[in-house]
Image (cartoon, rainbow, N blue to C red):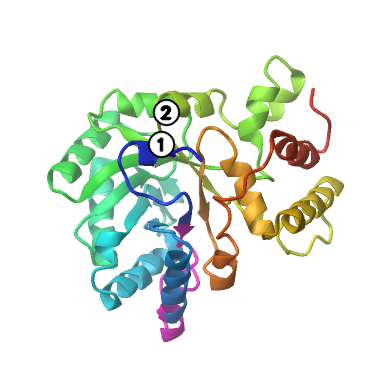
Amino acid sequence: MKAIPLQQRGLEVSQLVLGCMRMGGDWDKNSGITEEHYREGQAAVEAALEIGINMFDHADIYTAGKAEKVFGHVLKQNPGLREKIVIQSKCGIRFAEGTSPHRFDFSESHILNSVDGILERLGTEYLDILLLHRPDALVEPEEVASAIHQLKSAGKVRHFGVSNMSQGQIKLLQAYCEEPFIVNQLEMSLNKFGFLETGIHVNQDEYKDTVFPEGTLEFCRLENIQLQSWGPLAQGLYSGRSLDGQGESIVKTAELVRNMADEKGTTTEAIVLAWLMRHPAGIQPVIGTINPDRIRACRDAAEVRLTREEWYTLYVSTRGRNMP
Protein backbone atom coordinates (compact mmCIF):
# COMPACT_ATOMS: atom_id res chain seq x y z
CA MET A 1 0.00 0.00 0.00
CA LYS A 2 1.38 3.41 -0.98
CA ALA A 3 2.32 5.99 1.62
CA ILE A 4 -0.55 8.08 2.94
CA PRO A 5 -0.32 11.91 2.72
CA LEU A 6 1.08 12.43 6.24
CA GLN A 7 3.79 9.88 5.52
CA GLN A 8 4.53 11.63 2.24
CA ARG A 9 5.12 14.79 4.28
CA GLY A 10 7.77 12.98 6.32
CA LEU A 11 5.65 12.25 9.40
CA GLU A 12 6.20 8.71 10.65
CA VAL A 13 2.60 7.83 11.43
CA SER A 14 0.68 4.58 11.41
CA GLN A 15 -2.14 4.07 8.92
CA LEU A 16 -4.56 3.65 11.82
CA VAL A 17 -5.12 6.21 14.57
CA LEU A 18 -6.51 5.49 18.02
CA GLY A 19 -9.27 7.92 18.90
CA CYS A 20 -9.28 8.64 22.63
CA MET A 21 -12.76 10.14 22.98
CA ARG A 22 -13.96 7.41 25.36
CA MET A 23 -11.12 7.70 27.84
CA GLY A 24 -12.01 9.16 31.22
CA GLY A 25 -15.56 7.93 31.65
CA ASP A 26 -18.60 10.17 31.22
CA TRP A 27 -18.88 13.73 29.91
CA ASP A 28 -19.84 15.28 33.24
CA LYS A 29 -17.16 17.85 34.00
CA ASN A 30 -17.93 17.53 37.71
CA SER A 31 -17.25 13.80 37.91
CA GLY A 32 -13.77 12.58 38.73
CA ILE A 33 -11.31 10.20 37.11
CA THR A 34 -11.12 6.80 38.77
CA GLU A 35 -8.32 4.26 38.95
CA GLU A 36 -10.35 2.13 36.56
CA HIS A 37 -10.31 4.95 34.01
CA TYR A 38 -6.52 5.10 34.27
CA ARG A 39 -6.28 1.32 33.82
CA GLU A 40 -8.59 1.47 30.78
CA GLY A 41 -6.45 4.18 29.22
CA GLN A 42 -3.23 2.26 29.80
CA ALA A 43 -4.72 -0.95 28.38
CA ALA A 44 -6.01 0.86 25.28
CA VAL A 45 -2.66 2.49 24.57
CA GLU A 46 -0.82 -0.81 25.07
CA ALA A 47 -3.18 -2.61 22.67
CA ALA A 48 -2.73 0.14 20.08
CA LEU A 49 1.06 0.04 20.31
CA GLU A 50 0.92 -3.76 20.09
CA ILE A 51 -0.70 -3.62 16.64
CA GLY A 52 1.57 -0.85 15.37
CA ILE A 53 -0.53 2.25 16.06
CA ASN A 54 1.64 5.21 17.02
CA MET A 55 -0.81 8.08 16.45
CA PHE A 56 -3.43 9.19 18.98
CA ASP A 57 -6.36 11.56 18.44
CA HIS A 58 -7.84 13.84 21.11
CA ALA A 59 -10.02 16.92 21.48
CA ASP A 60 -10.21 19.35 24.36
CA ILE A 61 -13.92 18.54 24.84
CA TYR A 62 -13.61 14.74 25.05
CA THR A 63 -15.15 13.65 28.36
CA ALA A 64 -14.84 17.29 29.45
CA GLY A 65 -11.03 17.19 29.27
CA LYS A 66 -10.72 13.96 31.24
CA ALA A 67 -9.63 11.98 28.17
CA GLU A 68 -6.50 14.10 27.84
CA LYS A 69 -5.83 13.84 31.58
CA VAL A 70 -6.03 10.03 31.43
CA PHE A 71 -3.68 9.99 28.44
CA GLY A 72 -1.34 12.37 30.26
CA HIS A 73 -1.25 9.90 33.13
CA VAL A 74 -0.30 7.13 30.69
CA LEU A 75 2.54 9.27 29.36
CA LYS A 76 3.76 10.01 32.87
CA GLN A 77 3.77 6.30 33.74
CA ASN A 78 5.70 5.43 30.58
CA PRO A 79 8.84 7.60 30.33
CA GLY A 80 10.11 7.91 26.78
CA LEU A 81 6.75 7.10 25.17
CA ARG A 82 6.02 10.71 24.16
CA GLU A 83 8.92 10.84 21.73
CA LYS A 84 7.78 7.60 20.04
CA ILE A 85 4.21 8.65 19.27
CA VAL A 86 2.26 11.33 17.41
CA ILE A 87 -0.41 13.23 19.35
CA GLN A 88 -3.18 15.18 17.67
CA SER A 89 -5.84 17.22 19.44
CA LYS A 90 -8.64 19.62 18.47
CA CYS A 91 -10.22 22.81 19.69
CA GLY A 92 -13.05 25.12 18.69
CA ILE A 93 -16.18 23.54 20.18
CA ARG A 94 -17.59 25.18 23.29
CA PHE A 95 -20.45 23.64 25.24
CA ALA A 96 -23.27 25.62 26.80
CA GLU A 97 -22.18 27.63 29.84
CA GLY A 98 -24.63 29.69 31.88
CA THR A 99 -26.58 31.76 29.35
CA SER A 100 -24.11 31.01 26.53
CA PRO A 101 -25.29 28.33 24.06
CA HIS A 102 -23.39 25.43 22.56
CA ARG A 103 -21.21 27.20 20.01
CA PHE A 104 -18.03 27.14 17.93
CA ASP A 105 -15.14 29.51 18.55
CA PHE A 106 -12.08 30.13 16.36
CA SER A 107 -11.16 33.40 18.03
CA GLU A 108 -7.46 33.95 18.63
CA SER A 109 -7.83 33.98 22.40
CA HIS A 110 -9.88 30.79 22.50
CA ILE A 111 -7.45 28.87 20.29
CA LEU A 112 -4.45 29.98 22.36
CA ASN A 113 -6.14 29.26 25.69
CA SER A 114 -7.38 25.89 24.44
CA VAL A 115 -3.92 24.74 23.44
CA ASP A 116 -2.48 25.75 26.80
CA GLY A 117 -5.17 23.66 28.48
CA ILE A 118 -4.56 20.71 26.19
CA LEU A 119 -0.82 20.72 26.85
CA GLU A 120 -1.36 20.98 30.59
CA ARG A 121 -3.80 18.06 30.67
CA LEU A 122 -1.57 15.88 28.48
CA GLY A 123 1.54 16.85 30.41
CA THR A 124 3.50 17.53 27.24
CA GLU A 125 5.27 20.58 25.87
CA TYR A 126 3.96 20.28 22.32
CA LEU A 127 1.28 18.84 20.07
CA ASP A 128 2.31 17.21 16.83
CA ILE A 129 -0.92 18.33 15.15
CA LEU A 130 -3.73 20.70 16.16
CA LEU A 131 -7.07 20.50 14.33
CA LEU A 132 -9.74 23.19 14.26
CA HIS A 133 -12.73 21.08 15.23
CA ARG A 134 -15.94 22.48 13.66
CA PRO A 135 -16.39 25.43 11.27
CA ASP A 136 -17.05 28.67 13.15
CA ALA A 137 -19.60 30.83 11.29
CA LEU A 138 -17.98 33.93 12.82
CA VAL A 139 -14.41 32.97 11.96
CA GLU A 140 -11.96 35.80 11.34
CA PRO A 141 -9.15 34.19 9.31
CA GLU A 142 -6.70 36.83 10.48
CA GLU A 143 -7.22 35.75 14.08
CA VAL A 144 -6.71 32.10 13.20
CA ALA A 145 -3.52 33.02 11.35
CA SER A 146 -2.22 35.01 14.33
CA ALA A 147 -2.94 32.16 16.74
CA ILE A 148 -1.25 29.62 14.49
CA HIS A 149 1.81 31.84 14.09
CA GLN A 150 2.14 32.23 17.86
CA LEU A 151 1.68 28.51 18.55
CA LYS A 152 4.22 27.53 15.91
CA SER A 153 6.76 30.15 17.01
CA ALA A 154 6.47 29.08 20.64
CA GLY A 155 7.00 25.42 19.71
CA LYS A 156 3.63 24.44 21.17
CA VAL A 157 2.23 22.98 17.92
CA ARG A 158 4.21 21.53 15.04
CA HIS A 159 1.50 21.05 12.40
CA PHE A 160 -2.08 22.16 11.80
CA GLY A 161 -5.25 20.82 10.25
CA VAL A 162 -9.03 20.99 10.35
CA SER A 163 -12.00 18.75 10.99
CA ASN A 164 -15.43 18.65 9.33
CA MET A 165 -14.58 21.31 6.73
CA SER A 166 -15.26 21.79 3.04
CA GLN A 167 -12.68 22.80 0.48
CA GLY A 168 -13.95 26.39 0.48
CA GLN A 169 -13.56 26.70 4.23
CA ILE A 170 -10.03 25.32 4.07
CA LYS A 171 -9.11 27.62 1.19
CA LEU A 172 -10.32 30.66 3.14
CA LEU A 173 -8.18 29.82 6.17
CA GLN A 174 -5.18 28.85 4.05
CA ALA A 175 -5.25 32.19 2.25
CA TYR A 176 -4.34 33.89 5.54
CA CYS A 177 -2.09 31.26 7.14
CA GLU A 178 1.50 30.58 6.18
CA GLU A 179 1.44 27.15 7.82
CA PRO A 180 -0.23 24.52 5.62
CA PHE A 181 -3.33 22.68 6.81
CA ILE A 182 -2.29 19.06 6.42
CA VAL A 183 -5.30 17.13 7.82
CA ASN A 184 -9.07 17.17 7.29
CA GLN A 185 -10.99 14.80 9.56
CA LEU A 186 -14.49 13.89 8.34
CA GLU A 187 -17.10 11.22 9.05
CA MET A 188 -16.57 8.46 6.49
CA SER A 189 -17.41 4.79 6.76
CA LEU A 190 -19.20 1.91 5.09
CA ASN A 191 -22.36 3.40 6.60
CA LYS A 192 -21.52 7.07 5.96
CA PHE A 193 -20.62 6.95 2.28
CA GLY A 194 -21.56 10.47 1.19
CA PHE A 195 -17.91 11.07 0.30
CA LEU A 196 -18.48 8.70 -2.61
CA GLU A 197 -22.03 9.69 -3.49
CA THR A 198 -21.12 13.30 -4.30
CA GLY A 199 -19.03 12.02 -7.18
CA ILE A 200 -21.34 9.23 -8.28
CA HIS A 201 -24.41 11.48 -8.47
CA VAL A 202 -22.97 14.48 -10.31
CA ASN A 203 -25.72 15.90 -12.53
CA GLN A 204 -28.37 13.61 -11.01
CA ASP A 205 -31.36 14.31 -8.79
CA GLU A 206 -30.04 12.03 -6.02
CA TYR A 207 -27.17 14.43 -5.40
CA LYS A 208 -29.43 16.99 -3.73
CA ASP A 209 -29.76 14.73 -0.68
CA THR A 210 -26.01 14.27 -0.22
CA VAL A 211 -24.53 16.54 2.44
CA PHE A 212 -20.87 15.69 1.93
CA PRO A 213 -19.31 18.84 0.42
CA GLU A 214 -18.74 18.49 -3.31
CA GLY A 215 -15.11 18.61 -4.41
CA THR A 216 -13.65 18.30 -0.91
CA LEU A 217 -12.31 14.79 -1.48
CA GLU A 218 -10.63 15.83 -4.72
CA PHE A 219 -9.28 19.06 -3.23
CA CYS A 220 -7.64 17.21 -0.36
CA ARG A 221 -6.06 14.76 -2.78
CA LEU A 222 -4.71 17.57 -4.95
CA GLU A 223 -3.27 19.43 -1.95
CA ASN A 224 -1.89 16.29 -0.28
CA ILE A 225 -4.11 16.89 2.76
CA GLN A 226 -4.54 13.82 4.92
CA LEU A 227 -8.15 12.68 4.97
CA GLN A 228 -8.94 11.13 8.33
CA SER A 229 -12.15 9.26 9.00
CA TRP A 230 -13.95 9.57 12.31
CA GLY A 231 -16.47 6.82 13.02
CA PRO A 232 -14.80 4.43 10.53
CA LEU A 233 -16.15 1.29 12.23
CA ALA A 234 -19.72 2.63 11.94
CA GLN A 235 -20.33 2.05 15.65
CA GLY A 236 -19.95 -1.69 15.16
CA LEU A 237 -22.84 -2.10 12.69
CA TYR A 238 -20.83 -4.53 10.59
CA SER A 239 -18.70 -6.06 13.32
CA GLY A 240 -20.97 -7.60 15.90
CA ARG A 241 -23.44 -5.01 17.09
CA SER A 242 -27.10 -6.06 17.31
CA LEU A 243 -28.89 -5.37 14.03
CA ASP A 244 -32.40 -5.43 15.48
CA GLY A 245 -34.45 -2.77 13.75
CA GLN A 246 -31.80 -2.05 11.11
CA GLY A 247 -32.63 -1.80 7.42
CA GLU A 248 -32.15 -4.52 4.83
CA SER A 249 -29.05 -2.95 3.28
CA ILE A 250 -27.23 -2.85 6.64
CA VAL A 251 -28.16 -6.45 7.46
CA LYS A 252 -27.10 -7.65 3.99
CA THR A 253 -23.84 -5.70 4.13
CA ALA A 254 -23.00 -7.06 7.57
CA GLU A 255 -23.40 -10.57 6.19
CA LEU A 256 -21.12 -9.75 3.25
CA VAL A 257 -18.51 -8.35 5.63
CA ARG A 258 -18.62 -11.53 7.74
CA ASN A 259 -18.26 -13.71 4.65
CA MET A 260 -15.29 -11.70 3.37
CA ALA A 261 -13.64 -11.85 6.79
CA ASP A 262 -14.04 -15.64 6.85
CA GLU A 263 -12.68 -16.00 3.31
CA LYS A 264 -9.63 -13.88 4.08
CA GLY A 265 -9.03 -15.31 7.54
CA THR A 266 -9.38 -11.98 9.31
CA THR A 267 -11.86 -9.98 11.38
CA THR A 268 -14.93 -8.02 10.38
CA GLU A 269 -13.28 -4.87 11.78
CA ALA A 270 -10.34 -5.35 9.43
CA ILE A 271 -12.66 -5.68 6.42
CA VAL A 272 -14.62 -2.53 7.29
CA LEU A 273 -11.41 -0.52 7.71
CA ALA A 274 -9.78 -2.05 4.64
CA TRP A 275 -12.76 -0.90 2.57
CA LEU A 276 -12.02 2.71 3.55
CA MET A 277 -8.28 2.31 3.13
CA ARG A 278 -8.72 0.81 -0.35
CA HIS A 279 -9.74 4.26 -1.58
CA PRO A 280 -6.82 5.92 -3.44
CA ALA A 281 -7.15 9.11 -1.36
CA GLY A 282 -5.19 7.35 1.40
CA ILE A 283 -7.84 7.68 4.11
CA GLN A 284 -6.55 7.29 7.68
CA PRO A 285 -9.20 5.73 9.96
CA VAL A 286 -9.48 7.01 13.53
CA ILE A 287 -10.88 4.06 15.46
CA GLY A 288 -12.94 5.18 18.42
CA THR A 289 -12.95 2.15 20.69
CA ILE A 290 -10.79 1.79 23.79
CA ASN A 291 -11.67 -1.89 24.19
CA PRO A 292 -8.32 -3.70 23.85
CA ASP A 293 -9.87 -6.69 22.09
CA ARG A 294 -11.59 -4.51 19.49
CA ILE A 295 -8.39 -2.54 18.97
CA ARG A 296 -6.49 -5.76 18.36
CA ALA A 297 -9.24 -6.90 15.97
CA CYS A 298 -8.16 -4.03 13.69
CA ARG A 299 -4.63 -5.41 13.38
CA ASP A 300 -4.93 -6.72 9.79
CA ALA A 301 -6.64 -3.65 8.31
CA ALA A 302 -3.57 -2.35 6.49
CA GLU A 303 -2.69 -5.80 5.16
CA VAL A 304 -6.12 -6.78 3.80
CA ARG A 305 -6.41 -5.91 0.13
CA LEU A 306 -9.87 -5.82 -1.39
CA THR A 307 -10.25 -6.29 -5.11
CA ARG A 308 -12.14 -3.71 -7.12
CA GLU A 309 -15.03 -6.17 -7.36
CA GLU A 310 -15.08 -6.82 -3.59
CA TRP A 311 -14.94 -3.09 -2.86
CA TYR A 312 -17.84 -2.32 -5.19
CA THR A 313 -19.81 -5.29 -3.88
CA LEU A 314 -19.76 -3.73 -0.42
CA TYR A 315 -20.46 -0.24 -1.77
CA VAL A 316 -23.47 -1.30 -3.82
CA SER A 317 -24.77 -3.33 -0.88
CA THR A 318 -24.50 -0.54 1.67
CA ARG A 319 -26.11 2.07 -0.63
CA GLY A 320 -29.04 -0.30 -1.08
CA ARG A 321 -29.46 0.20 -4.80
CA ASN A 322 -27.51 -0.36 -7.99
CA MET A 323 -25.05 2.13 -9.37
CA PRO A 324 -26.65 4.81 -11.59
Residue matched to label 2? 169
Circle 1: residue type:
Pro
The magenta segment is 18-38
Residue 138 coordinates in the image, percent (x, y)? 37, 34
Asked if the residues shown at circle 1 and circle 2 are in contact, with their CB atoms under 8 angstroms apart, the answer is: no
The residue depicted at 44 percent of the width and 59 percent of the height is 53
Residue 111 coordinates in the image, percent (x, y)? 27, 47
Q: Which of the 4 image quarters holds residue 95?
A: bottom left
| Mark 2, secondary structure of its residue | helix
- 83 left or right of 105? left
Circle 2: residue type:
Gln
Tell me the quadrant of the picture where the C terminus can be found.
top right
- 208 left or right of 45? right
Residue 70 coordinates in the image, percent (x, y)? 37, 72
| Mark 1, secondary structure of its residue | helix
- 321 left or right of 48? right
- 167 left or right of 208? left
Is 324 drawn above or below residue 256 in the view shown?
Answer: above
The residue depicted at 13 percent of the width and 42 percent of the height is 153
Q: Is residue 30 magenta?
A: yes
What is the number of the mark on residue 84?
A: none
Residue matched to label 1? 5
Residue furthest to the left in view is 154
Label 1: few (<14), some or many (≥20) within 10 Å? Answer: many
Mark 1–mark 2 Cα distance, whole angstroms, equals 20 Å
Residue 268 coordinates in the image, percent (x, y)? 69, 58
Mark closer to the chain start, 1 or 2: 1
What is the chief secondary structure element of the magenta stretch? loop
